[in-house]
Image (cartoon, rainbow, N blue to C red):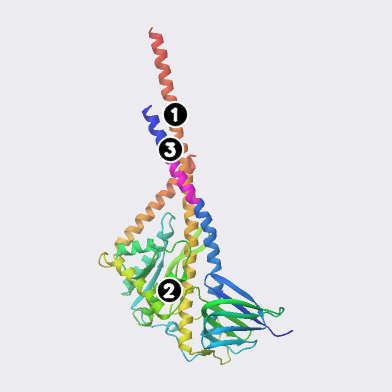
């Protein structure tokens, strides 16, 4: 019964794997709900600050913020790559990285260099291996996105933009469509493009700025960019948990199938062994 | 009925307050400002402090603490974008440096230039693996 014992061991090990994937599935399911709530909680702020920035772009302000002025030629672009910290979440990171690498390849074909800011361990590991120029990074965000952690890397990119080291800033992340579907997207962050659909107010008006336009608008713009990134990170986290839940569910189902197949083989060999024993006994009795 | 304006207080992590008010007092950077309906458009930074809101149907005022941020006033709408993080030019600079340093540390043992061929090969491998898993899964479903 050596074969039988081997198969039994194998069944046991697959069962253990299934227990783990099942547990991960349930953990991801409960985290997913919270991640989605956080993603929704971030929306009002993004909407409101978006509206304020839209108002500002309509105002006839004397001060033009550098972030709103488009540059004519692109020599170097910045890319903020948002990935997860941990794996085991299906094709989520692969899809994001594929989009990012595709665009970077296009840029390099046009002679445009690229600086990368990475948020999340997976993207960092990948960009390091392929040798991209990483200017700033943040990893280990955990399950809750914090604005505090994102200020640094965003500041690096915005400073680079203001100083003219990069001429445009993009971000790549997974957009949450629903639990089963996530989509990698690339979004332009800088220069901020005024919404073309917005009709300009005919009246000549401007804000009262206190203490002065530059200080206030700088503070507003950096917060707007951070809000964009924060929203993307929150969305990416919701994607991560739902992708993980789906991946782990698939893994659990696969394990179940494997166990069934192995059980069939095990029973067959057990029966074969019994039949063989019986025939041996019968043959032995006949010989007597 | 007295004229009212709409007040929204939001932070990046949550919506804090939304409702009508007769007037609002906000701790702006240059001193407290009281805002009545049809105030001229204004935009300013705010200091940490409490926002006082006088709701139209109540005697007492609502007090909401904000840790700084931005105040935008439109004639009928007051929007307060509250910060969740403690801010300051030096602090932000330090955070930027920290993020840079982390990247430099990570870059120290990297290979020379961005190798697109290698990147694509790695991605292709990952995609192939995922396809294989997908196929296995389908086969498994049919078998059962």
* Quadrant in the rendering for residue B56: bottom right
Residue that carries the numbered disc 1 in the rendered image = A268
A200 over B13 or under it: above or below:
below
A4 over A76 or under it: above or below:
above
The reply to the same-chain question for discs 3 and 1 is yes
Q: Quadrant of the C terminus of chain A?
A: top left
- Where does the image place residue B82, in percent across and percent down from the top left? 53, 76
Q: Earlier in the sequence, mark 2 or mark 3?
A: 3
- Where does the image place residue A83, in percent across and percent down from the top left? 42, 63
Mark 2: secondary structure: helix
- Extreme-top residue of the structure: A288
Q: Nearer the viewer, mark 2 or mark 1?
A: 2
The chain identifier of the residue carrying mark 2 reads A
Of residues B8 and A91, the one drawn nearer to the viewer in this rendering? B8
Q: Earlier in the sequence, mark 2 or mark 1?
A: 2
Q: Is residue A216 magenta?
A: no
Q: Name which residue lies at 50% across and 57% down.
A: A242
Q: Residues within 10 Å of mark 2 (few under 14, many from 20)?
A: many
- Where does the image place residue A102, in percent across and percent down from the top left? 37, 66
Q: Name which residue lies at 40% across and 9% down.
A: A286
Residue that carries the numbered disc 3 in the rendered image = A12
> What is the magenta segment's predominant secondary structure?
helix
The reply to the same-chain question for discs 2 and 1 is yes
The reply to the same-chain question for discs 2 and 3 is yes
Mark yes or no: residue A78 visible: yes
Q: Quadrant of the N terminus of chain A?
A: top left
- Residue stretch rendered in magenta on the structure: A12-25
Q: Residues within 10 Å of mark 3 (few under 14, many from 20)?
A: few
Q: Earlier in the sequence, mark 3 or mark 1?
A: 3
Residue that carries the numbered disc 2 in the rendered image = A151
Q: Is residue A13 magenta?
A: yes
Distance from the alpha carbon under mark 2 to that under mark 1: 63 Å
């Amino acid at each position: 019964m050596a074969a039988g014992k081997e198969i039994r061991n194998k069944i046991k090990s697959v069962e253990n794997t299934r227990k783990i994937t099942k547990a991960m599935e349930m953990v991801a399911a409960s985290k997913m709900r919270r991640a989605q709530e956080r993603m929704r909680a971030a929306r009002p702020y993004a909407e409101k600050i978006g509206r304020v920035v839209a108002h500002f772009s309509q105002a006839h302000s004397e001060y033009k913020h550098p972030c709103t002025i488009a540059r004519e030629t692109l020599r170097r672009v910045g890319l903020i790559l948002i990935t997860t910290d941990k794996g085991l979440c299906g094709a989520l990171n692969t899809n994001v990285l594929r989009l990012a690498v595709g665009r970077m390849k296009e840029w390099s074909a046009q002679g445009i260099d690229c600086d990368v800011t990475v948020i999340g361990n997976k993207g960092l590991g990948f960009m390091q291996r392929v040798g991209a120029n990483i200017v700033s990074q943040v990893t280990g965000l955990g399950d809750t996105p914090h604005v505090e952690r994102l200020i640094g890397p965003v500041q690096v990119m915005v400073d680079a933009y203001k100083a003219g080291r990069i001429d445009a800033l993009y971000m790549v992340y997974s957009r949450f469509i629903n639990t089963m579907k996530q989509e990698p997207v690339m979004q332009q962050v800088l220069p901020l493009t005024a919404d073309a659909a917005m009709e300009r107010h005919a009246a000549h008006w401007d804000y009262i700025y206190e203490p002065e336009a530059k200080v206030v608008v700088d503070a507003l713009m950096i917060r707007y960019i951070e809000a964009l990134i924060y929203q993307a990170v929150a969305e990416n986290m919701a994607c991560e948990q739902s992708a993980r839940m789906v991946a782990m569910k698939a893994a659990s189902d696969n394990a179940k199938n494997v166990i069934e197949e192995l059980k069939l083989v095990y029973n067959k060999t057990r029966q074969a062994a019994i039949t063989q024993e019986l025939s041996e006994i019968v043959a032995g009795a006949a010989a007597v | 009925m007295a004229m009212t304006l709409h007040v929204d207080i939001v932070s990046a992590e949550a919506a804090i307050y939304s409702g009508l008010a007769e007037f609002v007092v906000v701790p702006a950077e240059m001193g407290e400002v009281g805002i009545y309906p049809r105030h001229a458009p204004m935009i300013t930074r705010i200091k940490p402090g409490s926002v006082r809101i006088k709701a139209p149907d109540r005697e007492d005022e609502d007090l909401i603490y904000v840790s700084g941020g931005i105040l935008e006033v439109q004639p009928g709408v007051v929007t307060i974008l509250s910060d969740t993080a403690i801010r300051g030019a030096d602090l932000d600079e330090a955070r930027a440096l920290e993020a840079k340093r982390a990247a430099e540390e990570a870059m120290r043992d990297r290979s020379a230039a961005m190798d697109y061929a290698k990147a694509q090969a790695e991605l292709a491998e990952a995609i192939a693996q995922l396809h294989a898993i997908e196929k296995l899964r389908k086969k498994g479903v049919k078998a059962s």
